[in-house]
Protein backbone atom coordinates (compact mmCIF):
# COMPACT_ATOMS: atom_id res chain seq x y z
CA UNK A 1 0.00 0.00 0.00
CA UNK A 2 1.47 3.35 -1.00
CA UNK A 3 2.05 6.14 1.49
CA UNK A 4 -0.44 8.35 -0.35
CA UNK A 5 -3.17 5.70 -0.20
CA UNK A 6 -2.56 5.16 3.57
CA UNK A 7 -2.72 8.91 4.10
CA UNK A 8 -5.99 9.15 2.16
CA UNK A 9 -7.61 6.26 4.06
CA UNK A 10 -6.45 7.68 7.41
CA UNK A 11 -7.74 11.17 6.52
CA UNK A 12 -11.17 9.88 5.51
CA UNK A 13 -11.32 7.76 8.68
CA UNK A 14 -10.48 10.73 10.89
CA UNK A 15 -13.07 12.86 9.11
CA UNK A 16 -15.75 10.22 9.71
CA UNK A 17 -14.73 9.91 13.36
CA UNK A 18 -14.98 13.69 13.86
CA UNK A 19 -18.39 13.73 12.19
CA UNK A 20 -19.62 10.92 14.49
CA UNK A 21 -18.36 12.76 17.60
CA UNK A 22 -20.13 15.97 16.56
CA UNK A 23 -23.39 14.12 15.94
CA UNK A 24 -23.20 12.25 19.26
CA UNK A 25 -22.38 15.45 21.13
CA UNK A 26 -25.35 17.25 19.61
CA UNK A 27 -27.75 14.50 20.67
CA UNK A 28 -26.37 14.41 24.19
CA UNK A 29 -26.64 18.21 24.45
CA UNK A 30 -30.31 18.20 23.41
CA UNK A 31 -31.11 15.34 25.80
CA UNK A 32 -29.47 17.09 28.76
CA UNK A 33 -31.35 20.31 28.01
CA UNK A 34 -34.71 18.64 27.64
CA UNK A 35 -36.72 21.73 26.74
CA UNK A 36 -35.94 25.27 25.80
CA UNK A 37 -35.08 27.27 28.89
CA UNK A 38 -37.24 30.38 29.05
CA UNK A 39 -38.19 33.26 31.25
CA UNK A 40 -41.08 32.33 33.53
CA UNK A 41 -40.15 28.66 33.66
CA UNK A 42 -38.80 26.92 36.75
CA UNK A 43 -35.02 27.11 37.01
CA UNK A 44 -33.46 23.65 36.77
CA UNK A 45 -32.24 22.40 40.13
CA UNK A 46 -28.66 21.25 40.36
CA UNK A 47 -26.15 19.87 42.82
CA UNK A 48 -22.57 21.22 42.73
CA UNK A 49 -19.64 21.48 45.10
CA UNK A 50 -18.44 24.84 46.29
CA UNK A 51 -14.78 25.85 46.60
CA UNK A 52 -14.52 24.11 49.98
CA UNK A 53 -15.92 20.85 48.56
CA UNK A 54 -19.35 21.16 50.20
CA UNK A 55 -22.40 20.17 48.15
CA UNK A 56 -24.80 22.98 47.28
CA UNK A 57 -28.14 22.82 45.47
CA UNK A 58 -30.17 25.58 43.89
CA UNK A 59 -33.25 24.37 45.76
CA UNK A 60 -31.66 25.24 49.13
CA UNK A 61 -32.00 28.92 48.16
CA UNK A 62 -35.76 28.70 47.54
CA UNK A 63 -37.38 31.74 49.15
CA UNK A 64 -34.50 33.99 48.09
CA UNK A 65 -33.77 35.74 44.83
CA UNK A 66 -30.73 34.09 43.21
CA UNK A 67 -28.31 35.78 40.83
CA UNK A 68 -26.63 32.85 39.06
CA UNK A 69 -23.52 33.95 37.16
CA UNK A 70 -21.72 31.55 34.80
CA UNK A 71 -18.07 32.45 34.22
CA UNK A 72 -14.48 31.28 33.65
CA UNK A 73 -11.10 32.63 34.73
CA UNK A 74 -9.87 32.89 31.12
CA UNK A 75 -12.83 35.07 30.04
CA UNK A 76 -11.90 38.80 29.84
CA UNK A 77 -15.52 40.00 30.21
CA UNK A 78 -15.94 37.72 33.26
CA UNK A 79 -12.81 39.12 34.90
CA UNK A 80 -14.22 42.60 34.32
CA UNK A 81 -17.69 41.70 35.64
CA UNK A 82 -16.74 39.63 38.73
CA UNK A 83 -15.80 42.59 40.97
CA UNK A 84 -19.25 44.11 40.47
CA UNK A 85 -20.89 40.72 41.21
CA UNK A 86 -18.81 40.43 44.39
CA UNK A 87 -19.89 43.97 45.32
CA UNK A 88 -23.52 43.05 44.68
CA UNK A 89 -23.09 39.98 46.89
CA UNK A 90 -21.77 42.20 49.73
CA UNK A 91 -24.48 44.86 49.31
CA UNK A 92 -27.34 42.36 49.14
CA UNK A 93 -26.25 40.17 52.06
CA UNK A 94 -29.17 39.66 54.45
CA UNK A 95 -31.71 41.17 52.03
CA UNK A 96 -33.09 37.97 50.52
CA UNK A 97 -30.73 37.93 47.53
CA UNK A 98 -27.98 35.35 46.98
CA UNK A 99 -25.30 35.86 44.34
CA UNK A 100 -23.64 32.63 43.17
CA UNK A 101 -20.89 32.23 40.61
CA UNK A 102 -20.73 28.98 38.65
CA UNK A 103 -17.33 28.33 37.17
CA UNK A 104 -17.17 26.12 34.12
CA UNK A 105 -14.63 23.35 33.76
CA UNK A 106 -11.81 24.63 35.95
CA UNK A 107 -10.27 23.07 39.05
CA UNK A 108 -10.98 24.28 42.57
CA UNK A 109 -7.30 25.15 42.95
CA UNK A 110 -7.31 27.33 39.84
CA UNK A 111 -10.56 29.07 40.85
CA UNK A 112 -9.39 29.64 44.43
CA UNK A 113 -6.06 31.02 43.21
CA UNK A 114 -7.84 33.38 40.82
CA UNK A 115 -10.32 34.56 43.45
CA UNK A 116 -7.54 35.14 46.00
CA UNK A 117 -5.29 37.03 43.55
CA UNK A 118 -8.25 39.19 42.46
CA UNK A 119 -9.32 39.65 46.11
CA UNK A 120 -12.90 38.62 45.29
CA UNK A 121 -15.34 37.43 47.95
CA UNK A 122 -18.12 35.62 46.13
CA UNK A 123 -19.52 32.10 46.61
CA UNK A 124 -18.42 29.99 43.65
CA UNK A 125 -19.76 26.58 42.64
CA UNK A 126 -17.67 24.31 40.44
CA UNK A 127 -19.23 22.78 37.34
CA UNK A 128 -16.26 20.67 36.25
CA UNK A 129 -18.33 18.43 33.95
CA UNK A 130 -20.29 21.29 32.35
CA UNK A 131 -23.59 19.56 33.14
CA UNK A 132 -25.16 22.62 34.77
CA UNK A 133 -23.92 24.82 31.93
CA UNK A 134 -25.85 22.47 29.63
CA UNK A 135 -28.99 22.67 31.77
CA UNK A 136 -28.87 26.46 31.61
CA UNK A 137 -27.91 26.49 27.93
CA UNK A 138 -24.83 28.61 28.52
CA UNK A 139 -23.22 29.32 25.15
CA UNK A 140 -20.97 32.22 26.06
CA UNK A 141 -19.47 33.93 29.07
CA UNK A 142 -20.54 35.66 31.12
CA UNK A 143 -24.16 34.51 31.26
CA UNK A 144 -26.23 35.43 34.29
CA UNK A 145 -29.73 34.38 35.32
CA UNK A 146 -31.95 36.01 37.92
CA UNK A 147 -34.24 33.54 39.67
CA UNK A 148 -37.15 34.68 41.83
CA UNK A 149 -38.10 33.44 45.30
CA UNK A 150 -40.37 30.77 43.82
CA UNK A 151 -37.55 29.36 41.67
CA UNK A 152 -38.72 30.84 38.36
CA UNK A 153 -36.36 32.35 35.78
CA UNK A 154 -37.00 36.09 35.67
CA UNK A 155 -34.16 37.51 33.60
CA UNK A 156 -31.11 36.42 31.58
CA UNK A 157 -28.09 38.59 30.79
CA UNK A 158 -25.51 37.54 28.21
CA UNK A 159 -22.21 39.39 28.19
CA UNK A 160 -20.83 41.99 30.57
CA UNK A 161 -23.28 43.67 32.92
CA UNK A 162 -22.53 46.37 35.51
CA UNK A 163 -24.03 44.97 38.72
CA UNK A 164 -22.95 48.13 40.60
CA UNK A 165 -25.59 50.25 38.87
CA UNK A 166 -27.94 51.68 41.56
CA UNK A 167 -31.08 50.45 39.83
CA UNK A 168 -29.86 46.82 40.03
CA UNK A 169 -29.93 46.63 43.83
CA UNK A 170 -33.32 48.38 43.93
CA UNK A 171 -34.82 46.00 41.38
CA UNK A 172 -33.46 42.96 43.23
CA UNK A 173 -34.76 44.25 46.57
CA UNK A 174 -38.16 44.75 45.00
CA UNK A 175 -38.11 41.24 43.57
CA UNK A 176 -37.06 39.82 46.95
CA UNK A 177 -39.76 41.74 48.76
CA UNK A 178 -42.85 41.29 46.64
CA UNK A 179 -42.07 39.06 43.63
CA UNK A 180 -42.51 41.77 41.00
CA UNK A 181 -40.56 41.64 37.75
CA UNK A 182 -36.99 42.88 37.60
CA UNK A 183 -35.28 44.68 34.73
CA UNK A 184 -31.74 45.41 35.93
Image (tube, rainbow, N blue to C red):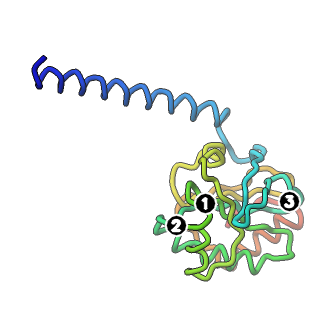
In the picture of the structure, the residue carrying the numbered disc 1 is 103
Identity of the residue drawn at 54% across and 62% down: 72
Q: Nearer the viewer, mark 3 or mark 2?
A: 2
Q: Nearer the viewer, mark 1 or mark 3?
A: 1
Residue 182, visible in the rendered structure: no
How many numbered marks have been drawn onto this rendered protein structure? 3
> Where 18 falls versus 116 (above or below)?
above
Give 160 or 17, whichever is nearer the viewer.
17
Rendered image: mark on residue 179:
3
Q: Earlier in the sequence, mark 1 or mark 3?
A: 1
In the picture of the structure, the residue carrying the numbered disc 2 is 73
Q: Quick check: 5 left or right of 52? A: left
User: In the orientation shown, which residue stands out farthest toward the top?
Assistant: 1
SS at badge 3? loop
Q: In whole angstroms, how far apart are the C-alphas of marks 1 and 3?
A: 28 Å
SS at badge 2? loop
Identity of the residue drawn at 24% across and 25% down: 10
Q: Earlier in the sequence, mark 3 or mark 2?
A: 2
Q: In whole angstroms, how far apart are the C-alphas of marks 3 and 2?
A: 33 Å
SS at badge 1? strand
Marks 2/1 in contact by CB < 8 Å: the verdict is yes
Give 147 or 79, whichever is nearer the viewer.
79
Q: Quadrant of the N terminus?
A: top left
Amino acid sequence: MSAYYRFLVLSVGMLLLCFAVVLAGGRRDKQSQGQELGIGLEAPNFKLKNQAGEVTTLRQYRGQVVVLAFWATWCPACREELPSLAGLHRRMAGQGVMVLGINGGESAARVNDFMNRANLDLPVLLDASGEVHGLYQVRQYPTTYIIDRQGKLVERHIGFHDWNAPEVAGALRSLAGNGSEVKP
